[in-house]
Amino acid sequence: MTDENKNKKPEIEMLDLASLDTIAASDAGARIEILHPVNKEPIGIFITLLGKHSTTFRELVREKINKRVKAESMASKRGKTLDPRTAEEVEAEALEMLVACTLSWETEIYEGEGKDKKVKEVKPTIFFDGQHLLFNHANGITVYSRMLWLREQIDDAIGDLENFIQA
């Protein structure tokens, strides 16, 4: 071994921060498996979501903040104060955010059981209240309004960066 090689330190591989681009990852979306609200078992429904760092999410937040700031400014110019938002208004905004961050939903139909269980078919719908529903804004509002447990899972998934960036 030469003196030159003895003094040479091994190169340390550095993390490229660009590999942790949470905006790009959140914009790409993640397919989330929905779990039963009580037993936490998978129920065969998957929802593809944008993350909290997505362009869509951040633009909606900015839009809502800007709207509120403008309303407060207009009220102030008139010598008034803006009424506080109601619980219903806050809930409606949160619901709109969840629907805006939902790209699609689907149901896996299985055949077999246990280890032999395999996906037979994937339908771009969910079965809700006796109907097969494709994802769209109106159906998203309907389902998320009534299924609070599902809304909680969606909200948690949107906020969990682990769904979008792998460690």
Image (tube, rainbow, N blue to C red):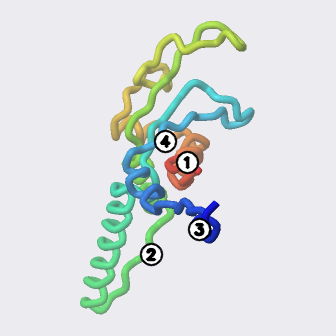
Q: Residues within 10 Å of mark 2 (few under 14, many from 20)?
A: few
Asked if 131 appears above or below 152 in the picture, the reply is above
Q: Say which residue appears at 67% left-offset and 9% top-offset.
A: 116
Q: Nearer the viewer, residue 54 or 88?
A: 54
- Quote the CA–CA distance across marks 1 and 4: 28 Å
SS at mark 4 in the image:
helix
- Judged by depth in the image, the label closer to the viewer, 1 or 4, is 1
- Judged by depth in the image, the label closer to the viewer, 2 or 4, is 4
SS at mark 2 in the image:
loop
**Kind of residue sitting beneath label 3:** Lys
Of callouts 1 and 3, the N-terminal one = 3
Q: Nearer the viewer, residue 158 or 144?
A: 158
> What residue sits right under mark 4 in the picture?
144
Q: Say which residue appears at 43% left-offset and 50% top-offset.
A: 25
**Kind of residue sitting beneath label 2:** Pro
**Kind of residue sitting beneath label 4:** Tyr
Q: Position of residue 124 (x, y in %)?
A: 40, 24
- Judged by depth in the image, the label closer to the viewer, 2 or 3, is 3
Quarter of the figure that contains the N terminus: bottom right
> What residue sits right under mark 3 in the picture?
8
> What residue sits right under mark 1 in the picture?
166
SS at mark 3 in the image:
loop
- Quote the CA–CA distance across marks 1 and 3: 33 Å
Q: Residues within 10 Å of mark 4 (few under 14, many from 20)?
A: some
> What residue sits right under mark 2 in the picture?
84
